[in-house]
Every structure is written in structure tokens, then in C-alpha cells.
């Protein structure tokens, strides 16, 4: 029996608070397409993507209409492309990426993830090829997203791979300098990469996943922010545990909408349903910001002491609410802090209250890492490597996912503005407080052994 | 004439709200040896209304039942209708389809309900429940409706919005599962199955 108050509160979430399903992502295993002839492999990849995902957008749109719930993005994630590149050369990697791009365009999906290599313990020739092809791939395709996993709690940290990534990120930025280095925004360097993450740019289909699966990423920072606003208005002196409870209950409701859409899409497509990733993912719109949630809690200047605790409170409340809402929670599930994609975070960086170093601290207690951060074009490869190593260390030691998605913008200096448009947002070039001094450490290369936490058996 | 179900009656009552109304009604019915097997009650702007069905152990006339209930109320306090329960009427009434919620919000004006219900009836949509809430000059209508399975819901939503938008009214028609998902705690899998 539907109650009037239930209907009204749900309508409010949908109409006033920007509740939506951020992404329905179809995972497709393409390993069967592997072969010695890349033209044949690329054709098989194209064919399989179109076969599996041909109806994805139509079905998502139908359900969106039925429920009055926007499904903002429909996306694809494939098994690691490096598995298709063993025994091939540079041109083959580009050919494969173009086939992915073309098929994605034809099924009317905006992004495809999975141009991925998992190199935490070492690199195969195919994985090395994939990384070295990234400047060409990310500059010559529009929809392909890439990710490289360089560390896990179990395997430790591959510093040789990180050294290669530092140089590669600069090359990608240079190859896309006519787009302000935008190519680097389509690459995430991970520690403990999740195999069922539906969010871009880091989505891929793990080798332990089904042949074809639907994973859903919910959103809802606007809903959480407004619920805290209402609580604070009702009880101005409310305590932080009351705020945590409010965020938890809201996360419950947000997660349920994601599972509803995900299960229905999967059923109509005749594929398995995977997980709901209950991350709070912001967009550049006002009212759809994670930074605004911290401000609603009482952090008037993002980056001030206490900000990390606010992130921890929110991240934990979101997980608890989501875990009760669904037994199919996965992916990253927490609060994202992608600077350019969140107007409140971007403004705090521009104002200088939120620094790279504070963001790094925040990533120790939230769901991802240093995300969508603009750096000066003259940032060195060693500095980028150091940033990646620090983030990977946080993930490796704390048994959590961390990622780095930074964009060294060619020709730009600290304080200059850059706008990528759309969901990628805009921001200000920020500085690394101490940009040099770790070159010798980084250049030693090698491998940081797996931490003691890895010996859990 | 439709065949009545022996000794089963449907009773409808309207009365200004006060404490104890339902007690007065159900006592009268029960004391006549009846089992109440269906009931729906609501209060709207100070008025109480109830519809109930009851099966009696002995043969009674509608007037017998009405008089027994009236006995527990003051003179002219209530309006009451008692009719034999007709199985055939129940079988032909409801629309079989998917349950949706319809909401209409905006500045109140005469004729909103007529416009909305005329549209819904024209589409073969059955209204199961309807609520209205006023905040200042604004009104919110909320309806629970059964939509025939073959109806194109997207086209219906668009026509509904085109009808009400010129009147300054926002309107939505959404499947009930979105409201159940966000307000209930049962598993989503069960919810989807139960909707079929």
C-alpha cells in the first residue's frame, strides 16, 4: 500500500534533489575474440559488443520513463584489453581501440572502459604494449577509457610500472594538447582495482566476472545534502551522529533505486545482474556536489581541519546504508572527490583552501583517490610517479581502492583555469607543495613488497 | 438483476469525525451476528467515511442493518447506505494492469480533478486511491492508478503533461515500484517479482 508521505518524499528526491542512476554499465568478456590476426580480433570485438549491447540504451530509456528516474549514462566495460594484445604490436593496439570506439558509438553508448592492464606484480609483453599505446589510443579515440593497476595489498607495488605510467601520462597529455591534455582524464592508475566498478574512467570487467553482466552506479549527493539541510534546519544543534544516521538512511533509499533499475535491465536483456556501486558521484551542477555535503555538515571552507573527518563520516554512513539496502553491493561504494566534476571542491581548490596534500589525506578515508586534478604542464614524470606511489601506498596498506586521475595540462601554469565541458567539468591548475626532491627514490624502481597485511591466510 | 451473495452486504457511512465512530458501527454490525470481512476507512477535512462488507448468519433486510447502526448515533448525525453484495459487480470492476502513482502539483484552481479524471478514464485507467494536500495556494494531488498493460506509458505521460502544463501544473506518472523500493525494506528481487 503506497502512502502519501512515501510518494511525496520520493518525488522530492527525483524532482528537486537530482536523484538519478548515474550509470548502467554492461560488462562484456571479450577474451574469446583473441587471435593472432588483429583485424579478425577487432572484427570479433566489434561484433560481440554490438550483439550484447545493442539494446542496452533502449531498455534503459524505457525503464527511465516507467519509473520517472533518469539513467544518466549507459556504458560498457570489457575484460582487460591487454589479454587481446599478447603477441601483437603497437598498430594492433590502436586498431583494437578503434574497433572498441566504433562499436561503442554504434550502440549509442558514451564511454567504454577496459583498455586495462593489471601489472601490480609484473608486466607481460601485452600489458607493456597496452601502456605504451595509451598516448595514441587516448588521442585517436573518443570513447575508450583506460586503467592500469599498479599495486595490491596482496602483491605489493610495482614501481617499475609506475615509472612507465609517469612518463605515459605526460605523453598522453602532450598527444591531446589541442584538447588541454584531456586524454589523461580518460586514464586511472589504481591500487586494488575493483573488478566490478561501473564508473568511468576506471570500469573494466574482471576475469572472475560473468560472461556478460549489468553493474549499476547510483549517485545522489544532492539527496544526501538536502536531507542534512532539512535535519539542520529542524534541529540546528544536531550532533554528528544524528547527521551520520540521516546520511545512512538516505543512502539506503538511493541504493534501492539503483538495484531496482539494474535488476530490471539485466532481466530484460537476459544477462546476469552484478552489483550496485553506491558511490556518491558528483557532477559539476550546483546541488549535485559531494563538497556541498561537507559544507552542510558545518565545514564552511573545504580543506579546513575537520574536512577529512567529515569525509570519513559520510563515506562510512553511505556504506552502512547501502549494505542494508542491498546484498549486491560492490564496486567502490563510498564518496568520490573528483575535483573538476564537483563545483564546490573545484572552487575550494581555486581559493587555495583545498590543497593536493589535504586531498591526499581525504583519499585515505574515502572511496577512490586523487581524481580529476589539474597540474601544471611542466610537472615532471618523477613528481607524477611520486604522487601515484603515495596514493598506491594508502590503498595497499589500508586494503582499499585508491586511484590517481591527474591531468598535467600542456602549457598551463598554476592558477590558470581549464574547462573540459560536460560531466568532466572545469577547474584550476593546482600546485604540488613540494614538487621535487623524491627523484632518487622514485628512480630506484623495482617493487615494494606486499605489506604484512597481505599475510592473512 | 445481478445475483447477490446470500446474507453478505456492503455498508457505506458518512459522518462528521469524532472519537468512537468505528466502535459504534462495528458493535452494531457484530451484535447482529455478522462477520466483517472487508473494510476501508478514511478521514478527509473533518469528515469520516467508511465502506465495509459483512456476512450475516441470518437473513436480514438492508433496513434492519441500517436501523441497527443508526441506533448508535444521534438523529441526523450520519448518512448510511446498505446494499446486498453483488459478486458480478466486483468481477467486472477493476482494471487489470500495472499500478502507477500519478502526482499533480501547482496552484489550486477549480476543475483540476475533472480534467485529470476525465483524461484517466479516457485511457481506461482505474483510480484506486486519491489524496489531495494543500499548502497555501498550492495543491498536490496524488493518485494510485491501475494502468492497462497494453497502454503506451510514454505516450500517456506526454499527453498528460501536455494537458496540464498550460494550466501551470506539473505532473508525473510513475510505476509504483520506485516508491516501494525507496520506502520498503524487502528485497528488490521480491518486489520486482510481486509486480508481475
Image (cartoon, rainbow, N blue to C red):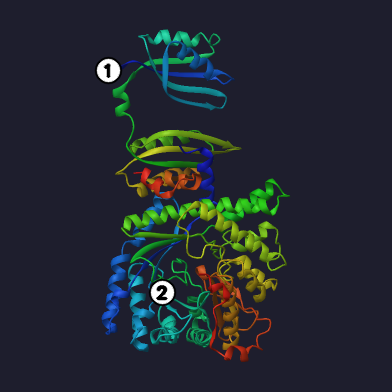
Front disc: 2 or 1: 2
Is disc 2 in contact with disc 1, using a CB cutoff of under 8 Å?
Answer: no
Q: x, y (%) of residue A141?
A: 40, 79
Q: Chain of mark 1?
A: B
Left or right of A352 on screen, residue A407: left
Residue to which mark 1 is pinned: B3
Q: Which mark is residue A114?
A: 2
Task: Name the outermost residue toward the front.
Answer: A457
Q: x, y (%) of residue B172?
A: 45, 46
Left or right of A211 on screen, residue A227: right
Q: Tell me how far mark 2 sits from mark 1, CA to CA.
A: 68 Å
Packing grade of label 1 (10 A; few <14, some 14-19, many >=20) is: few
Packing grade of label 2 (10 A; few <14, some 14-19, many >=20) is: many
Residue A73 vs A248, above or below: the answer is below
As helix, strand or loop, the secondary structure at mark 2 comes to strand
Q: x, y (%) of residue B38?
A: 41, 24
Left or right of A295 on screen, residue B4: left
As helix, strand or loop, the secondary structure at mark 1 comes to loop
Q: Is residue A372 visible?
A: no
Amino acid at each position: 500500500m503506497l502512502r502519501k508521505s512515501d510518494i511525496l518524499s520520493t518525488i522530492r528526491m527525483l524532482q528537486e534533489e537530482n536523484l538519478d542512476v548515474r550509470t548502467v554499465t554492461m560488462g562484456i568478456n571479450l577474451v574469446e575474440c583473441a587471435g593472432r590476426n588483429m583485424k579478425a580480433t577487432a572484427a570479433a570485438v566489434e561484433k560481440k559488443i554490438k550483439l550484447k549491447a545493442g539494446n542496452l540504451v533502449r531498455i534503459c530509456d524505457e525503464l527511465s520513463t516507467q519509473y520517472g528516474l533518469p539513467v544518466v549514462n549507459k556504458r560498457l566495460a570489457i575484460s582487460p584489453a591487454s589479454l587481446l594484445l599478447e603477441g601483437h604490436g603497437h598498430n594492433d593496439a590502436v586498431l583494437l581501440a578503434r574497433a572498441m570506439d566504433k562499436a561503442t558509438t554504434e550502440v549509442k553508448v558514451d564511454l567504454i572502459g577496459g583498455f586495462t592492464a593489471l601489472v601490480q606484480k609484473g608486466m607481460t609483453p601485452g600489458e607493456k604494449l597496452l601502456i605504451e599505446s595509451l598516448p595514441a589510443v587516448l588521442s585517436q579515440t573518443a570513447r575508450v577509457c583506460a586503467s592500469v593497476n599498479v599495486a595490491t595489498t596482496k602483491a605489493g607495488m610495482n614501481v617499475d610500472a609506475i615509472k612507465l605510467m609517469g612518463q605515459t601520462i605526460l605523453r598522453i597529455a602532450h598527444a591531446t594538447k589541442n584538447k588541454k591534455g584531456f586524454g589523461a582524464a580518460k586514464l586511472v592508475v589504481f591500487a586494488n582495482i575493483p573488478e566490478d566498478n561501473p564508473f568511468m574512467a576506471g570500469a573494466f570487467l574482471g576475469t572472475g566476472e560473468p560472461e556478460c553482466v549489468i553493474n549499476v552506479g547510483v549517485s545522489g549527493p544532492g539527496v544526501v545534502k538536502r536531507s542534512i539541510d532539512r535535519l539542520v534546519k529542524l534541529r540546528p544543534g544536531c550532533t554528528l551522529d544524528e547527521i551520520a544516521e540521516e546520511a545512512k538512511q538516505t543512502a539506503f533509499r538511493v541504493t534501492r533505486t539503483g538495484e531496482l533499475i539494474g535488476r530490471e535491465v539485466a532481466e530484460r536483456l537476459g544477462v546476469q545482474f552484478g552489483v550496485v556501486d553506491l558511490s556518491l558521484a558528483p557532477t559539476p551542477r550546483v546541488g549535485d556536489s559531494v563538497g556541498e555535503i561537507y559544507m552542510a555538515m558545518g565545514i564552511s571552507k573545504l580543506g579546513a581541519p575537520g574536512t577529512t573527518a567529515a569525509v570519513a563520516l559520510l563515506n562510512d554512513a553511505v556504506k552502512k546504508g547501502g549494505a542494508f539496502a542491498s546484498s549486491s553491493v560492490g564496486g567502490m561504494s563510498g564518496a568520490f572527490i573528483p575535483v573538476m566534476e564537483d563545483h564546490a571542491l573545484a572552487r575550494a581548490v581555486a581559493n587555495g583552501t583545498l590543497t593536493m596534500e589535504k586531498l591526499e589525506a581525504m583519499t585515505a578515508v574515502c572511496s577512490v583517490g586523487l581524481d580529476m586534478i589539474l597540474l601544471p604542464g611542466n610537472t615532471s614524470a618523477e613528481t607524477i610517479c611520486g604522487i601515484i606511489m603515495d596514493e598506491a601506498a594508502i590503498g595497499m596498506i589500508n586494503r582499499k581502492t585508491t586511484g590517481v586521475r591527474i591531468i598535467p595540462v600542456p602549457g598551463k601554469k598554476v592558477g590558470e583555469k581549464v574547462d573540459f565541458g560536460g560531466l568532466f567539468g572545469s577547474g584550476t591548475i593546482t600546485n604540488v607543495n613540494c614538487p621535487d626532491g623524491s627523484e632518487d627514490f622514485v628512480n630506484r624502481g623495482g617493487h615494494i613488497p606486499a605489506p604484512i597485511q597481505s599475510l592473512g591466510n | 438483476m445481478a445475483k447477490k451473495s446470500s446474507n453478505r452486504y456492503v455498508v457505506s457511512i458518512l459522518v462528521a469525525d469524532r472519537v468512537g465512530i468505528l466502535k459504534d458501527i462495528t458493535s452494531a454490525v457484530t451484535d447482529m451476528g455478522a462477520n466483517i470481512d472487508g473494510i476501508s476507512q478514511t478521514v478527509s477535512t473533518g469528515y469520516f467515511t467508511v465502506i465495509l462488507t459483512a456476512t450475516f448468519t441470518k437473513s436480514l433486510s438492508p433496513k434492519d442493518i441500517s436501523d441497527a447502526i443508526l441506533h448508535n448515533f444521534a438523529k441526523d448525525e450520519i448518512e448510511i447506505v446498505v446494499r446486498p453484495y453483488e459478486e458480478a459487480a466486483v468481477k467486472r470492476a477493476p482494471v487489470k494492469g500495472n499500478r502507477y502513482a500519478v502526482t499533480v502539483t501547482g496552484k489550486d484552481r477549480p476543475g483540476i480533478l475533472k480534467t485529470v479524471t476525465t483524461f484517466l478514464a479516457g485511457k481506461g485507467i482505474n483510480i484506486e486511491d486519491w489524496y489531495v494536500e494543500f499548502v497555501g495556494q498550492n495543491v498536490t494531488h496524488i493518485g494510485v492508478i491501475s494502468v492497462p498493460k497494453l497502454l503506451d506509458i510514454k505516450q500517456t505521460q506526454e499527453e498528460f503533461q501536455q494537458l496540464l502544463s498550460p494550466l501551470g501544473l506539473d505532473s508525473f506518472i510513475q510505476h509504483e515500484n520506485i516508491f516501494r523500493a525507496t520506502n520498503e525494506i524487502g528485497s528488490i528481487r521480491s518486489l520486482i517479482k510481486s509486480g508481475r
